[in-house]
Image (cartoon, coloured by chain):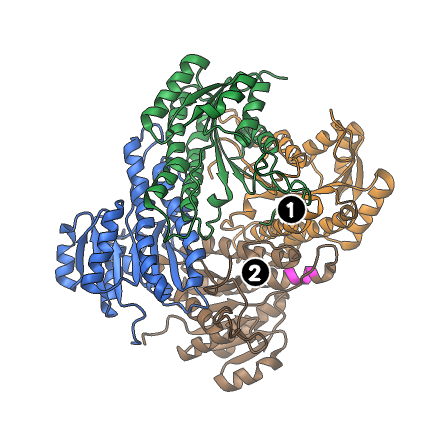
Chain colours: A brown, B orange, C green, D blue
Amino acid sequence: MDTPRYRTALIVGAGPGFSASFARLCIRAGLNVALAARNTAKLAEFCADTGASAYPCDARDPHDVAGLFDAVEARQGTPDLVLYNAAGRVRGPVVDLDPESVRQSIEVSAFGAFLVAQQAARRMLPKRHGAIVLTGATAGVKGFANSSAFAMGKFALRGLAQSLARELSPQGIHVAHIVIDGGIRSEAWPDPETAPDSTLDPAAIAETCWHVLHQHRSAWSWEVEVRPWVERF
Amino acid sequence: MDTPRYRTALIVGAGPGFSASFARLCIRAGLNVALAARNTAKLAEFCADTGASAYPCDARDPHDVAGLFDAVEARQGTPDLVLYNAAGRVRGPVVDLDPESVRQSIEVSAFGAFLVAQQAARRMLPKRHGAIVLTGATAGVKGFANSSAFAMGKFALRGLAQSLARELSPQGIHVAHIVIDGGIRSEAWPDPETAPDSTLDPAAIAETCWHVLHQHRSAWSWEVEVRPWVERF
Amino acid sequence: MDTPRYRTALIVGAGPGFSASFARLCIRAGLNVALAARNTAKLAEFCADTGASAYPCDARDPHDVAGLFDAVEARQGTPDLVLYNAAGRVRGPVVDLDPESVRQSIEVSAFGAFLVAQQAARRMLPKRHGAIVLTGATAGVKGFANSSAFAMGKFALRGLAQSLARELSPQGIHVAHIVIDGGIRSEAWPDPETAPDSTLDPAAIAETCWHVLHQHRSAWSWEVEVRPWVERF
Amino acid sequence: MDTPRYRTALIVGAGPGFSASFARLCIRAGLNVALAARNTAKLAEFCADTGASAYPCDARDPHDVAGLFDAVEARQGTPDLVLYNAAGRVRGPVVDLDPESVRQSIEVSAFGAFLVAQQAARRMLPKRHGAIVLTGATAGVKGFANSSAFAMGKFALRGLAQSLARELSPQGIHVAHIVIDGGIRSEAWPDPETAPDSTLDPAAIAETCWHVLHQHRSAWSWEVEVRPWVERF
C-alpha cells in the first residue's frame, strides 16, 4: 500500500452502519481514528475491538465541537479527514410535528455539520490539505411528503456541501457529499432473502467513499449517489 | 374581475420590495392584508397608505407565530394566502462565520418558514383551500462559495417547499416556491441606466406569483424561477 | 386589453390539446395564427372555426421548415411567437425498439425544434423581439424505464431550451420550456369523475404559457412545470 | 487481484484521452479489449502496444453497430463491459449552425449510444451481467450559450443513461454516466504549469470509472461527475 493520504480521521455522529464500516477502512489503512457521539457508551465495544478512540460531543454546540477538535488534536493529531454522519430524523405530517423537535432536527442534520466543517477547515486550510465528507440522503435531493423536517435538514446539508465544495476545493480541501439512497443493512434491518442486496451494505458505501477521498485532484467528485441495484428512483 | 379566490393574505417578513408589491396586488384584488415583521415601525407608512395591518412577530418563535395567526384570524379573518418572505443573510468564508449568526440565519430562512407553514396548514386543511408561498433565492438551488450559511437556509427552504408541495397539494393547498435569481430593484439599488431591466422589478415578481396562485388546480406549478433577461445563469 | 405584445403566432406540431388551447388564446388576443403539421387535414375544422391558417410541414426537414417560415411570413407576417409542440413518442424496452423509429423519434422531439428555433431566431434577432416556446414533458427531466427513446428526445429538447435561453434572452428573445407533468385531458382521455382535475386541462396549461410570454423582461422564467394537484412527483 | 468481474471490454468511439486510459486499465486487469472507431488507423499504434484489437464502425449506423458486436463476439468473446465514448461537437450561435451537421452531431452523441446500448443489453440481459458506461459532459447537465447542438446530444445521452439505469439495473446491468466537467489533459492541451491539475488527467477519470464498475450491487452509482479541484462550477 502507498503512503496513506490522510493521517487522522474524525467521525462525528459515529454509530454502527456506514460510519463504522468507514472507520474500519481508515484503521486498516493505518489512520488514527477518533469517533464522536453524544453518547459514547455505545462506541465502547467498537473502540476496544479496533483501537479507535471515542469522544463525547453534542454536535449542535459550538463550544463542544471546538473542544472536540482540540482534544483529538492533542491526543491523536490534527484531523485531516473528517466525516459528519449525524442526522435528525423527525417525520410526520407538517401539522403534527413538534416545533422544538424540528428545530433540533435541523440543527443535528445541518448546523452541526457546519460547526464541524468550520473547525475542520480552520485546521486544513493552512496546510491546503484534507477532506470533509458529509453523509447525505435521498431526502436532501427530493423532499417527500410527511418529511418536511428531515428534508429541511438534509437539503441544508447538501447546500452546505455544495457551497463548501466551491469554496474549499480550489484551496486544496476535498469536500464530498455521499447521497445514500435506500435503507442501510443492519442487524435490525437485515437484507431480505427474497430481494438480495436490496439494502445497502455499509461496507460498500464505505468503499465508494474511500475511493472518492483518494481521487486525483484533477478529477474530484463533490457528490456521489449510491443505491441498491433494485431500488426505484 | 371574478370573485377573489382568496380572502385574507398574511405576509411574514414583510418589507419593501417583492413583498410590498405582492401586498399591493392583494389589496387591489380586495383581500384583507396582514403584514408581520420583527419591527413593525418600518411598515407604518405602507399600512397607512394601503389599509394593510401590521403585526409584530419573531418568525423563529413558535409561540409568536401561533399568536400571530390567532391575532390575524380575530381581526382580519383566517389567512388563506400566506407568504413567507423572511431570510437570514449571513455571508463570508466558512472559517470566519460566527456560529450564533449562522444558527439564527438558518432559523430565519427556514425554521420560521416551517412554523408559518404549519400554522397555515392547520387552518387551510379543514377547508381544503389555501396557498402557501415561500420566497426562494438562487442560493437555494446553487450553493455559492462564501455563502454556506445562506445556502443552508435557502436549500432548507426549498426542501420544505418540495416536501409541503408533495404533502399538501393533494389536499387542496397550493404550495409555491418563487426562486428570485438576481438583484431586486429598490431605491437603494436602482436599475442601472446602462443595463435596463437587469434588476428585477418587484412588481413583475409579484405578477408571476399572483398568476401561480390563480392557476387551475389541474395545472399547478410548485416552483417558478424568475430572472432578468440579461442575468447570467 | 393592452396592445398585444406579439403579432403573429406560429405553432408547429399543432393538434388538439394544449396547442389548440394556446392557439385560441392567441386568436382571442388578436394575433394572426399559423398552424403547421405533417397532416393538415386534421386542422381543417379548427381553422374554419377560428380563422387560423394551416401549413403542411415535416418539422424534421430543414427545407420544409425554412419554407414554412417564408410562407407564413408572406401570408400572415413574420412570426414573433413560435411554439414547438411536436413529439416523437416511441416506448418499450431498449432491446425491443426499432432503431429507425428511435432515430425519427429523436428528430421529431428535438431536431425539429432546433430547426424551428433557428428559423425563428433568425427573424427575431434583428428586431430583438420575440418568443420561442418548447413543449416539454416529465420525460425531459426524468428518464423512465422503457422510455429511452422518448427520454432522449425530451432531454435533448430541454438542453436546447436551456442553451437557447442563455444565448437568446440577453438579445431580447424570451425562450420558455413548459414541462407538462401528467396526462392532458381530451375526448379520448377524459378527466376521471372519481379524481377531478387529475388530468391537465389544456386551457390551464395555455394560461400559464400565456402568462410566461407576457412577463416583464426583468423577471423572465425559462422553465415552468405544471402538474395536476393530485399528481405524484 | 481478485478474479476480474468482466471478461471482454468494448470501447466505441475509442481515441486518445479517457478511453485510452480506460482501455489500459482493462488490459492490466486481464480483459480482452476491443476498440471501435470510424477510422481505425489512429488506433494502430495503441493496439500494437497493448494487444487491443480495433474494429471500424460508424456508430450511427444500426447495421454497423450490430456487425461490430458480432465481430467482437466471434473474435474476443461477448462484450460484458461496454463504453460509449463518441461525441459530436458542433458549436456556434444557433442561427449559424448547419442543420445537417447538427443532425449528425446528435446522432453521434446520442443515437449511436442508443444503438450500442441496445446491442449490449441484448447480450447482457440473458446473463443478468454486464455494464454499460456512457461518457458524459457538462454540456449534458447545463446548456450553454452557442452550444445548442452539443447540449442536445449530451442531454439526450444523459436521458438515455438515466432511463437505462432505471430499466436495466434491476436486471443486473450496471449503467453508468461519467460526467467530465473540464478539459482533458492531452499532448495538444497540456496541463498549465501555472495552474497544476486544472485539466483532468485521463488516467484519473479512468480510475473513478473503474471504481464505479466494481461497486457492490447494493450500492451502485448511476452518475458520477468529476472535475479539477480548481474548476469553477
Question: Residue C233's x, y, as percent?
Answer: 57, 49
Mark closer to the observer (1, 2): 1
Determine which quarter of the picture holds residue B14. top right
> Does residue A104 belong to the magenta stretch?
yes
Secondary structure under badge 2? Answer: helix
Residue lying furthest right: B74
- The residue tagged 1 is C230
User: Residue under mark 1: which chain is it in?
Assistant: C
Determine which quarter of the picture holds residue C88. top left
Question: Residue C182's x, y, as percent?
Answer: 56, 43
Which amino acid lies under the numbered mark 2 shown in the image of this protein? Phe
Along the line of sight, the residue nearer the viewer: C176 or D183 = C176
Q: Which residue is painted at 68% across and 31% down in the image?
A: B21
Characterize the local packing of mark 1: few (<14), some (14-19) or many (20 or more) Cα atoms within 10 angstroms.
many
Residue lying furthest bottom: A48
Question: Can residue A128 be seen in the rendering of this structure?
Answer: yes
Q: The magenta stretch spans which residues?
A: A102-106
- Residue C175 numbered mark, or none: none
